[in-house]
């Protein structure tokens, strides 16, 4: 099993920044592609960004491209989401996810999930 623990969510003003962290345990971290998804009330869980096991490939959803950056520190078994220029529409619960394969944009492709952390962007 892979256990994921998220942190770093909170309240920020429009235009501000936050950095989310997701610490993984239970398996060899470099075997897993990691991703961030988000879900606002009443909405589907949507893809935000993903990174391959060695960090050589990244993928970003259009609404966050140029504003968000995913990275990973395999020595710490941790993936990060740096969020800049935040907008109210970024408000959601953000989830970390893992799969033992290449990156994907699809919720159903990820076997392991964190508990979610709330990000609220005030206008």
Image: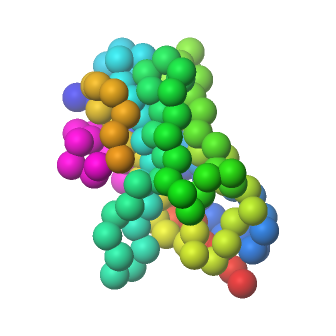
Residue 81 spot, x, y in % from top left: 59, 45
Could you say which quadrant of the image residue 101 lies in?
Answer: top left
Q: Residue at x 39, y 39 (%)?
A: 4
Farthest-out residue, front: 62
Given residues 22 and 102, the one toward you in this image is 102
Tell me where residue 30 appears, x and y as whole percent. 42, 17
**Above or below, 17 relative to 21:** below
In terms of image quadrants, where is residue 75? top right
Q: Where does residue 63 sit, x and y in percent of width and height? A: 56, 62
Q: Relative to 10, is 105 on the left or the right?
A: left
Judged left or right of residue 122, residue 117 is left
Which residue corresponds to the image point at 39% horizontal and 79% vertical from the top-left?
41
34, above or below 115, in the image: above
**Start-end of magenta stretch:** 106-115
Magenta stretch encompasses residue 112: yes
Residue placed most toward the observer, 9 or 88:
88
Q: Is residue 23 visible?
A: no
From what the image shows, is residue 19 above or below residue 54? below
Q: Quadrant of the C terminus?
A: bottom right
Is any atom of residue 74 visible in this view? yes
**Measuring 34% from the left and 40% from the top, which residue is drawn there?**
104
Residue for point 23% across, 42% down:
109
Q: Quadrant of the N terminus?
A: top left
Indicate whether 4 appears above or below 77: below
Is residue 86 highlighted in magenta?
A: no
């Amino acid at each position: 099993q892979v256990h994921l623990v998220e942190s770093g969510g909170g309240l920020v003003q429009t235009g501000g920044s936050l950095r989310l962290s997701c610490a993984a345990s239970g398996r060899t971290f470099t075997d897993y592609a990691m991703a961030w998804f988000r879900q606002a009330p009443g909405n589907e869980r949507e893809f935000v960004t993903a990174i391959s096991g060695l960090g050589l490939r990244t993928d970003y959803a259009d609404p966050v491209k140029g504003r968000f950056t995913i990275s990973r520190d395999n020595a710490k078994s941790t993936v990060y989401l740096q969020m800049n220029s935040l907008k109210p529409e970024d408000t959601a619960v953000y989830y970390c996810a893992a799969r033992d394969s290449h990156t994907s944009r699809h919720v159903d492709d990820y076997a392991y999930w964190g508990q979610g952390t709330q990000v609220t962007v005030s206008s």
